[in-house]
Image: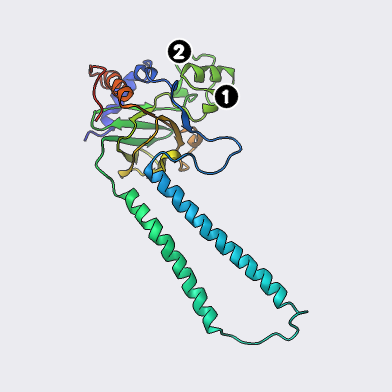
Amino acid sequence: MKHLLPLSGLMASFAALPALAQDSLRIDGLDVIGRPVDGETGFQPAVTEVARDIHNLDYLILVIITLITLFVTGLIIWVMIRYSRKRNPTPSSFTHHTPIEIAWTIGPILILVLIGAYSLPILFRQQEIPEADITVKATGNQWYWSYEYVDEEFGFDSYMIGAPASLGDDDDDVTPFVLDDAMIAKLEREGYSREDWLLATDTSIVLPVGKTIVFQVTSSDVIHSWTIPAFGVKQDGVPGRLAELWFTPEQEGVYYGQCSELCGQAHAYMPITVKVVSEEAYAEWLGNAKAEYAGIEQPLTVASK
């Protein structure tokens, strides 16, 4: 497996060129599924088995917490009324009540066993990395991501649209990190909209739907964290270590994430964009990406794995 760092010089040489492979795969025609919505709470739609497992576990624990809260609240209210000074002017004096002590010991144990019976299999499924159809290495940097398609031996850097490194010769009127009319126009030129501000990147990870994807996550400087909420994955990238996560996207669309570890001054400007497409669209993108980023001429009908 080739390390990403030897590719840095090659990727830098392409930085000033238009992203031809990315231009061939616009957001048009893809639903934006993994984007936060103003005024709403809760999880993003689950589009992987891992995400569904997490949602189901959360709902189970929510039911358990709700029942415990209602029981304890009702018990407190009952005790306040039943044993008030007016109703019980002469309180009993005792220090132990064996049946109650057994109940409040066994009850929590049974609750924890129930939670463990559901959560541990989910944890094991997350940590048991299956054989990959596609392996991507994600390296966190201050403050952008570098990606390497390990089996294809090419890679590229990914900057937030609006970061200085994402600005080209035709962006003289664009002020970095400022959302104004010029920035909105740049987003639209890249195929995005105002709602994608702080989420969209100049290059995107492109993956085929229905394939098993394994991500190797590391960092070149400080601790970063690679996450896509709709996929149910989050993994810290630690310098000198290589961690893994996996998912199988089940729905085509555009998904967003952001670095989830405080990593310095521009932490808020380190988003992640993933486009999940059909196998045919992925094969076309892969051919263009190899030609652009690795300098390897490939036919546009390269079959995805």
- Return the residue found at the far top: 170
Please indicate whether residue 179 sits to the left or right of residue 30 in the image: right
Label 2: state its secondary structure: loop
Task: Indicate the quadrant where residue 207 lies.
Answer: top left
Q: Residue drawn at (42%, 34%), measured in percent from left and top?
A: 142
What is the crowding at mark 1: few (fewer than 14 residues within 10 Å), some, or many (at least 20)? Answer: some
Q: Amino acid at mark 1?
A: Leu
Q: Earlier in the sequence, mark 2 or mark 1?
A: 2
Q: Residue drawn at (59%, 66%), measured in percent from left and top?
A: 71
Q: Position of residue 298 (x, y in %)?
A: 23, 18
Q: Is residue 126 above or below residue 47?
A: below
Q: Position of residue 161 (x, y in %)?
A: 47, 24
**What residue is shown with label 1?**
179
- Return the residue found at the far left: 1
The residues tagged by marks 2 and 1 sit, at their Cα atoms, a distance apart of 19 Å
Label 1: state its secondary structure: loop
Mark sitting on residue 53: none
